[in-house]
Image (tube, grey):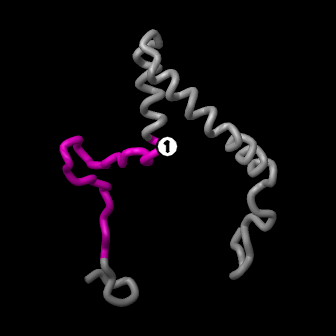
């Protein structure tokens, strides 16, 4: 189904319920950060839990690290296997 110019595919917009859930969750941001810091600093906590908490804190403070994408794991090109044919006029390969 094609949409006409100026016509939205989602005229109702984002559901209001998701905004309410988001807003409710944001009320606990400070407590959540305090919990993560507590876990990160707890020497008796499992190492994996401490690393996970530290990572979550850093991600929220600085953003997630970029993930490079390459084709061979060594920074090489990504081969897509696409062939392109340029046409000079209707039905005439150049």
Q: Horizontal placement of 12 versus 91: left or right?
A: right
Q: Where is residue 18 drawn, in percent x and y?
A: 75, 48
User: Residue drawn at (63%, 33%), measured in percent from left and top?
Assistant: 31
Camera-nearest residue between 32 and 87? 32
Q: Residue furthest bottom?
A: 89
Camera-nearest residue between 15 and 29? 29
Q: Main secondary structure of the magenta part?
A: loop
The image quarter in which residue 16 lies: bottom right
Q: Which residues are magenta?
A: 59-85
Q: Horizontal placement of 45 versus 35: left or right?
A: left
User: Residue drawn at (68%, 44%), measured in percent from left and top?
Assistant: 26
User: Residue drawn at (31%, 74%), measured in percent from left and top?
Assistant: 85
Q: Where is residue 25 drawn, in percent x and y?
A: 70, 40
Q: Tag 1's secondary structure?
A: helix
User: Residue drawn at (31%, 79%), measured in percent from left and top?
Assistant: 86
Which residue matches tag 1?
A: 60
Question: On screen, 87 above or below 8?
Answer: below
Q: Where is residue 35 drawn, in percent x and y?
A: 57, 27
Instruction: Inspect the magenta stretch and tell me whether residue 14 lies in it.
Output: no
Q: Mark 1, residues whose alpha carbon is within 10 Å: few (<14), some, or many (≥20)?
A: few
Which quarter of the rendering shows the C terminus? Answer: bottom left
Camera-nearest residue between 79 and 10? 10
Q: Residue furthest top?
A: 44
């Amino acid at each position: 189904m094609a949409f006409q110019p100026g016509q939205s595919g989602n005229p109702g917009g984002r559901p209001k319920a998701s905004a309410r859930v988001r807003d409710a969750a944001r009320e606990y941001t400070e407590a959540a950060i305090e919990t993560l810091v507590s876990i990160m600093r707890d020497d008796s906590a499992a190492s994996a839990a401490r690393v996970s908490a530290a990572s979550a804190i850093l991600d929220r403070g600085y953003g997630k690290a970029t993930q490079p994408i390459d084709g061979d794991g060594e920074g090489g090109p990504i081969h897509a296997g696409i062939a392109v044919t340029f046409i000079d006029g209707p039905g005439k390969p150049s």
